[in-house]
Image (spheres, helix red, strand yellow):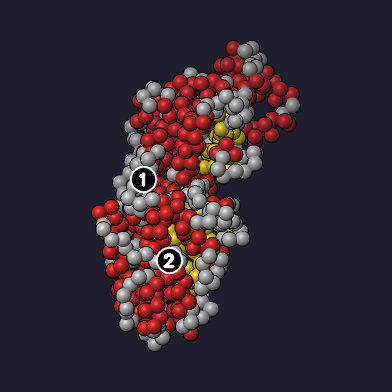
Amino acid sequence: MDSTNPPQMNGSEPKQPDVTNKGLRKDTGVKELDAQLGNLFGGYRAEWLGESLFELFTAPTYFPELMTPRPCVLMGGRGTGKTTILRCLSYVGQFALNGQKADSVQSWEFYGMYYRVNTNRMSAFKGPELDARGWQRHFAHYINLELCDSTLQFLAWHQMHCPDAPTLGQDACNAVAASLNLGLVDSLRALSDGVADARLRFEATINNIGDEKGAPGLSMQGAPIDLLFSHISRLPHFRDRKFFFLVDEYENFEDYQQEVVNTLIKHSSGAYTFKIGVRELGFRRRTTLNNNEQLISPSDYVLINIVDKLEGRFPRFAADVCNARLERLHVADPKVIRSVEDLFSELTEDDEAHLLGVSSRTGELMDVLRQEGATSAELAAFEALPPMLGHFLNFWAIGKQTPTLTALRDYMHAPGPWSQRLENYKYAALFTIRRKKRGIRKYYAGWSVFARLAAGNIRYLLELIDTALLAHLRDGNSLSRPIDPKTQTESAATVGRKNLTELEGLSIHGARLTKMLLGLGRIFQVMAAKPEGHTPEANQFEVRDDADDVGMMKAAEVDDLLRGAVMHLALLRFTGTKPQDESNTKAYDYMVHPIFAPLFEFSYRRKRKISLSAEDVLDVVTNPNQAIGRVLEQQHRDMTDAPIPEQLRLFEGFYAGGA
């Protein structure tokens, strides 16, 4: 990357965007376009979009699977769209998606109540003030209040839009109030107000539970919810209708709290069910309050892994999402490109080799051949070869530890096998063209490449698109011409660096995750820069089972670190060759998330793996310089002639050994 024109960091959190079309002038000025693009693509998180979330919603192929009456667990990393999907399943979302037509509400097949698990509130239900059973009972009552409150808010909303529909009578409301230990009520409004007030008072009580003389009245777990829905299902307009509790960020529950909610899921009545949004490895407990009873897929719930569901379909789905946003641009230029596939044009490997300057290698290699005793006919033959093929002959010769002239003569004698060799190793050879030079040493450009970098994560993809589009405009270009590969590559590195630096604030493991990623990224970067004679594109690792590896405490530390890395998208994990056991991290293969590949300069493609010990993984964090050197030595490489990429200069202190 050209140090005279470093990529711009975009680490600041954008303001909540307003992407409505009202008031936007048809102006092609850069500032106006910046604002529009920021509104359309800068809202990486569903929480930032407000009601505009529904206007920009594109349904994924698995969306209908969530509309069935069976409990569902929607699993995916942050940014994979869980919140968007669950909010669009809610009654507020369905109302927006159906054109806000009040007369259609009673014909809906399902009604969803969205509930986001708040860490601040969940963490209040632990401490020395109560024993485990006491906290469990108090939390169960709180969940009763929360879910009843959400349901009553829906009933009030429904009554507002369907005023002629009958609602719960006084007897039903009193029964629910009694179940929650509330006083007598005379209407649905009074019940709703009473539950909301009871929830607020209970939160205040929990916050001061150690100072309270009298314990609050608690309800039986699940009983008020079942009772409320038994009355709702008797109303004529709700017969045969499905009700969903849409619980987002399930990982924010404490372990025992997951067991409480699991029990509700396991024993929920036929009138309602649960749709859960959770990060990978965030579904930590599958048992209910009965230790002999577990939630098992598919008998108890349907597991929908977002990345698996979108595998092979993500580029098309993501293109639909982005193109719908480009269509909303208000610009006067009729030549504006409104297709991300056309804006982010692809580079062939030969085109990329040309941009990397492979032609300049011909002269250097001619000198090498002369020194090795090539004849004038052989030199002429080499000079006539396509530059990439000539570079590859040298690449192959280095790997075989033979003269380049030997490879040339073999090619001249029997060119056939070389076509397949070139096809197999061409991508790996691209990393060697500018190995010791400044500037871009590998391009990351093209719609398919950006989709692969995002790895099924729509938030990452929007961030890549937003960063590249803004850089394109600020360089004086218009949206009527494609974004050049240099801008795409620099933007991709910027996004990778931003997400790397943000890791530190994501969890209690953040600083360690950042260091682990820096260490692993450097290892795979050096391996990519020195692929000759090795298996190409090694960018995954397994943690091997060494009998004398480390003590149990260190092994548990590695497990904890890897789990945090997967949950926060520092790493991706895949089922390994060993028997699958979700509790055993050694049953999986791991890969640095592709979003970081342009930052470190290695392959984003899922290919081959190396084997690391648990001690290697820990030492990469605590003693990076020695650990990186040791792992590279195990892979028969070293850091000689492998300078740190310019976009990583910020972290030189870490690589010098300052963990």
Mark 2 nearby-residue class (10 Å; few <14, some 14–19, many ≥20): some
Q: Quadrant of residue 506?
A: top left
Residue 558 vs residue 265, the one in the foreground: 265
Q: Quadrant of the N terminus?
A: top left
- Secondary structure at numbered mark 1: helix
Q: Quadrant of residue 209?
A: bottom left
Tell me which residue sits at (37%, 70%) in the image: 180
Compare marks 2 and 1 and give the one earlier in the sequence: 2
Mark 1 nearby-residue class (10 Å; few <14, some 14–19, many ≥20): many
For residue 178, which numbered disc appears in the image? none
Tell me which residue sits at (57%, 54%) in the image: 292
Query: Residue extending furthest front?
Result: 213
Q: CA distance from mark 2 to mark 1?
A: 58 Å
- Secondary structure at numbered mark 2: loop
Query: Residue extending furthest bottom?
Result: 164
Residue 426 vs residue 98, the one in the foreground: 98
Comparing labels 2 and 1, the label whose residue is closer to the camera: 2
Q: Quadrant of the C terminus?
A: top left
The type of residue carrying mark 1 is Ala
Q: Which residue is mark 2?
A: 220
Q: In this rendering, is residue 181 above or below 426?
A: below
For residue 471, which numbered disc appears in the image? 1
The type of residue carrying mark 2 is Met
Q: Position of residue 169 (x, y in %)?
A: 39, 84
